[in-house]
Amino acid sequence: MAESNNPQATLAWDGKAVSFPVVEGSEGERAVDVSNLRGQTGLVTLDPGFVNTGACRSAITFLDGERGILRYRGYPIEQLAEYSNFLEVAHLLIYGRLPSEKEFGRFEYEVKHHTMIHEDLKRFYEALPKDSHPMAVCSAVVGALSAFYKELADPRNAEQVDGAALRLVAKMPTIAAYSYKHSIGQPFVYPMNSLDYPADFLHMMFATPCEEYAVEPALAKALDLLLILHADHEQNCSTSTVRLVGSSMANLFASVSAGISALWGPLHGGANQAVIEMLEEIERGAETPASFMSKVKDKKNSVRLMGFGHRVYKNFDPRARILKKACGEVLSALGRTDRLFDIALGLEEIALKDDYFVSRKLYPNVDFYSGIIYRALGIPTNMFTVLFAMGRLPGWIAHWKEMHADPAFKIGRPRQIYIGEKRREYQAVSLRT
């Protein structure tokens, strides 16, 4: 790599040297721009899982896994978690700035007055089995919004895009809560404009027409925090899916529906459910954290430690630190203890001291404590990933918009290395052996 105002990286191939520009991000990250690699050399890159491939330039989220740093639009996640609220963070991600008091008032008003879904769309739920996973329901309903808002489907019309984005942020809690109500056979509860964003969701989840239901402020605050911490996380699987689908000029509703499906996978958004199942299994087996961690270290044992380690973070996930503190605060506010929380603390204590885990950089990630808070809120396990999708929605929208505004916009179309059969001649079925 040459040291100059225009650094280059040189590739030696087939008897000649070819140079490629090195681009640098605002935080010092460097990348070799190989967009002309095939044209100059006939080669393509092979990078399974895209672990070393930058698919875009983005100004939304900075993540440094080695130092445990996460910032939205330059703001440290720790500050946003302590001082901000989810709707303000949504505005920050989608529009690129923290809103003024007047801007936030207008944004909140618009969100609150678009929370209801079309009555015909409510009947869409009736066609789905009651035992459907809520993520399948949410993906289907969000995709169906394309049919109800055909006038907001043009990706290159800024006014239509803003209209679609606003309706997604406003209606996602309603869509999510209705997926739960449908699964338990209870009537849908209309949103209440007098409640703030997280409280309105909890009210739609747990209220019934039979009696008054008051949302506990501490629980609404905890949910707001969870949504903030999940709002964006750079080029993860679901965000990349939203970008890739959107690159075909698919509308925002369709792209987000695809993102929900990607998030559903147990290696992505479903991980917090796996953590709870692990902790419950430890509790049922009357194991101690120490005995369980011994099994994890035993190569002959198939036991897996869930909620530790991360594809990007090689340090403590900063979101996990925030949620660990929040777990204690929520349980204290409710005046109760949680055996699973105690087990989680025990597992973390061992992992942070035992060289087996330290050397492998297995630190708690955001999924390790989020499920415990969801449980404290009364959220059923199969709804955990739905709450993740609610939180991640502003990030998906922000990346979709950024991609369409990029002068280098083009449809996503990865290359491959073909390893199948070479040319073969067709034979009639009677001649095949």
Image (cartoon, helix red, strand yellow):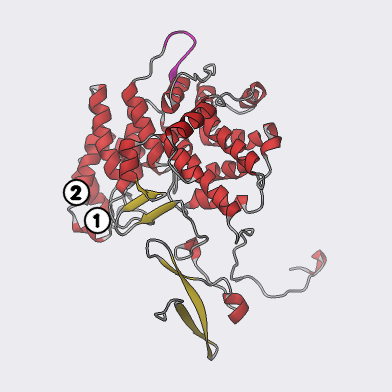
Which residues are the magenta region?
206-212
Q: Please determine whether, in this image, residue 55 is positioned above or below residue 13.
A: above
Which image quarter: residue 63? Answer: bottom left
In depth, the one of 315 and 336 nearer the eye is: 315
292 vs 6, left or right, is left
Q: Please determine whether, in this image, residue 181 is positioned above or below residue 283.
A: above
Q: Secondary structure at mark 2?
A: helix
Q: Residues within 10 Å of mark 1 (few under 14, many from 20)?
A: some
Q: Work out which quarter of the rendered image holds the C terminus and state it.
A: bottom right
Q: Hey, what amino acid is under mark 2?
A: Ile
Q: Work out which quarter of the rendered image holds the N terminus and state it.
A: bottom left
Question: Is tag 1's residue or tag 2's residue first in the polypeptide sequence?
Answer: 2
| Picture disc at residue 334 | none
Q: Secondary structure at mark 1?
A: helix
Which image quarter: residue 152? Answer: top right
14 vs 279, left or right, is right
Residue 291 visible to an observer of this rendering: no
x%, y% of residue 50? 49, 62
Asked whether residue 159 is drawn in magenta, I would say: no
Q: Hey, what amino acid is under mark 1?
A: Phe
Q: Are marks 1 and 2 in contact (CB under 8 Å)?
A: yes
Residue 234 visible to an observer of this rendering: yes
CA gap, disc 1 and disc 2: 9 Å
Q: What residue appears at the point 57 percent right and 53 percent down from the top-left corner?
A: 403
x%, y% of residue 252? 61, 43
- The residue pinned by badge 1 equals 357
In depth, the one of 18 and 345 nearer the eye is: 18
Q: Please determine whether, in this image, residue 347 is positioned above or below residue 415.
A: above
x%, y% of residue 70? 35, 50
- The residue pinned by badge 2 equals 350
Asked whether residue 207 is drawn in magenta, I would say: yes
